Amino acid sequence: MRILKNILLKKYTTFKIGCKTRYFIQADNKNKLLEAIQWAKDRGIKFFIIGGGSNVLFSDNGFDGLIIKNSWVEARKGKEAVFASSGAPMDFLVKFYTKNGFSGLEWAGGLPGTLGGAIRGDAGAFGGEIRESIISVESFNTNSNRVMMRSYKDCRFDYRDSIFKNNNDIILSAELKFKIGDKKVIKDIINSHIIYRKTYQPLEYPSAGSFFKNIPVRDVSAKIKNKFIAVIKSDPFPVIPAAAVIDALGLKGLIVGGAQVSEKHPNFIINKNNASCADAIKLMDLIKKSALKKFGIEIQEDVQIKC
């Protein structure tokens, strides 16, 4: 393995925030990924795995450990499933499905990040979720040092959640469902989602993606439900968009240092001018406190904070 030192993390994240990591390894296959994990464990060094670098916010003080960049990109068709590696970008998998005339990942058109991250957080958009495609997930448990296969049921998927957020498993690969579809129809749906993202999301600025989880309607009072009744959507069950809550708080466009609540889509905190981790955290805390005070809503971040 080639072990690098003092690598700037902002180069490997979509937020473009973060100082240096003590150690850095790129792992482009399963064996290298497992070797990198073992290297850190043998030395008692903390480690963190990144894929596409979205959905994460690193500290201004750097990371005193090992960052493993999962660069294992692979997808192949089986008789009844698609095998895909955890480091495969979602864009890569969407194109693989489209090329083969497979339906099932249209909802992920334009989605950033990798399959591993999508599974970990049960990523979803446009009424679809990654859990709908999962047959099984191969993972490595860092406590037992065992590679295991988890069935769909074993993954314990929940809204933007899974067992992998709450245990010591590292996602390695997955078997995905597919259906044969019409290539033109599949392409048209994917392109419509990509166009929507370009139109309504601030993709011209660095960000971590959608910063907060949408709020399940079941978790709010009838009064709050009625206030936001016009914007409730299915995701895939009824939710109040976090963007609508932030907009109603009057926080759209608010700036702290170099970070800003996007005017285009207020559920994006953007790095407008060399923002620091501290800038983004201050904005996050302000939004959470304001939502709780005004609406009694405990809005939750969907971004991993490594500060």
Image (cartoon, helix red, strand yellow):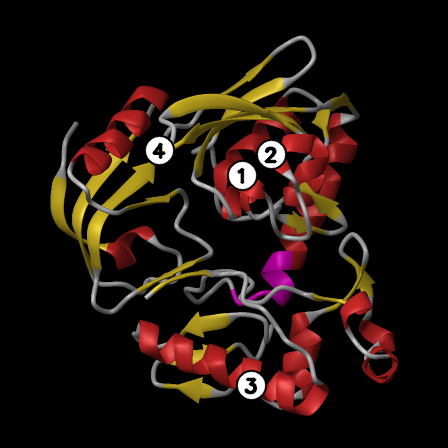
Residue that carries the numbered disc 4 in the rendered image: 71
Q: Position of residue 126 (x, y in %)?
A: 73, 52
Mark 2 and mark 3: Cα distance apart in space: 38 Å
Any mark on residue 94, and which?
2
Q: Nearer the viewer, residue 255 or 145?
A: 145
Q: Which of the two discs, 2 and 3, labels the residue nearer the N terminus?
A: 2
- Nearest-to-viewer mark from 1 and 3: 3
Q: Secondary structure at mark 1?
A: helix
Any mark on residue 91, and which?
1
Q: Amino acid at mark 4?
A: Ser
Mark 1 and mark 3: Cα distance apart in space: 35 Å
Q: Residues within 10 Å of mark 1 (few under 14, many from 20)?
A: some
Q: Are marks 2 and 3 in contact (CB under 8 Å)?
A: no
- Nearest-to-viewer mark from 2 and 3: 3
Q: Which of the two discs, 4 and 2, labels the residue nearer the N terminus?
A: 4
Q: Is residue 192 visible?
A: yes
Location of the N terminus by quadrant is top left
In this rendering, would 170 be left or right of 181? left
Q: Are marks 4 and 1 in contact (CB under 8 Å)?
A: no
Q: Position of residue 3 (x, y in %)?
A: 14, 36
Q: Nearer the viewer, residue 124 or 119?
A: 119
Residue that carries the numbered disc 3 in the rendered image: 289
Q: Nearer the viewer, residue 307 or 17?
A: 307
Q: Amino acid at mark 1?
A: Asp
